[in-house]
């Protein structure tokens, strides 16, 4: 309720909250020990807690950062960065059981650069030579950056995964281990306690 509405209700003479009339205090002989309704009514249950959300945008940020770093050192920029830009984030959403968010991420990462390129081309159409193409590339880059930020900040939220259950007993658990490292065989015991 806004402040103006509360003031208007009070000025108009309508009480904001119902007011109970005061009754004279009961004498000890007249006061019942407990009202009969209280014994039969179940206690009010608390409202259910909201579902906990988990942010997994850091995984998408790592995938995008690796893609940009690889694209900086590889001549075939389109192939390398295209795979990490369009494929990795939707699969991360799907791995977190958000397939709709994966589809939204893919469409967002496809549509915003395209829209940015169109706006950039329109803004640079008054120039001759490479002007429209440069403006289109700048618009596409802004669209790509916008899609990354929106994906990480708004789409990368999902239900929190439950913590793995620990064994009921805190006993010592031993497991035999054997293998070879650089051609040298080894054997041992690994354990948890």
Image (cartoon, grey):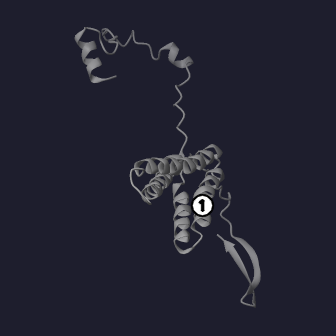
Residue 131 appears at what percent x and percent y?
A: 42, 57
Image height check: is 134 above or below 178? Answer: above
Quadrant location, the C terminus: bottom right
Residue appearing at x 39%, y 10% in the figure: 29
Q: Residue at x 60, y 56 (%)?
A: 86
- Residue 83 shown left or right of residue 112 in the figure: right
Q: Which residue sits at x=62%, y=65%?
A: 79
On the rendered structure, is 2 left or right of 153? left
Q: Is residue 163 visible?
A: no
In this view, the residue in front, 129 or 142, is: 129
Residue 186, by quadrant, is bottom right
Q: Residues within 10 Å of mark 1 (few under 14, many from 20)?
A: some
Q: Position of residue 36 (x, y in %)?
A: 51, 13
- The answer to which of 1 and 118 lies nearer the viewer is 118
Q: Which residue is at the front of the view, 36 or 116?
A: 116
In the image, taking residue 136 as reference, residue 14 lies left or right, namely left
Q: Position of residue 178 (x, y in %)?
A: 77, 82
Instruction: Please state the horizontal and vertical placement of residue 167, each as a whole percent of the image.
Output: 68, 59
| Count of marks placed on residues | 1
Mark 1 = which residue?
Answer: 82
Q: Nearer the viewer, residue 128 or 138?
A: 128
Q: Residue at x 25, y 8 (%)?
A: 13
């Amino acid at each position: 309720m806004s402040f103006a509405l509360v003031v208007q209700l009070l000025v108009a003479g309508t009480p904001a909250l119902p007011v109970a009339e005061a009754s004279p205090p009961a004498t000890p002989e007249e006061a019942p020990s407990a009202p009969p309704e209280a014994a039969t009514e179940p206690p009010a249950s608390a409202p259910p807690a909201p579902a906990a959300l988990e942010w997994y945008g850091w995984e998408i940020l790592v995938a995008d950062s690796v893609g940009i770093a690889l694209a900086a050192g590889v001549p075939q920029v389109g192939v390398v960065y295209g795979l990490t830009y369009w494929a990795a984030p939707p699969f991360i959403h799907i791995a977190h059981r958000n397939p709709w968010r994966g589809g939204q991420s893919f469409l967002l990462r496809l549509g915003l650069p395209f829209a940015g390129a169109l706006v950039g081309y329109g803004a640079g159409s008054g120039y001759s030579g490479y002007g429209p193409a440069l403006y289109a590339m700048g618009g596409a880059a802004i669209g790509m950056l916008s899609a990354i930020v929106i994906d990480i900040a708004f789409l990368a939220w999902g239900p929190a995964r439950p913590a793995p259950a620990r064994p009921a007993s805190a006993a010592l658990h031993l497991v035999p281990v054997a293998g070879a490292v650089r051609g040298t065989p080894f054997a041992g015991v690994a354990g948890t306690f």
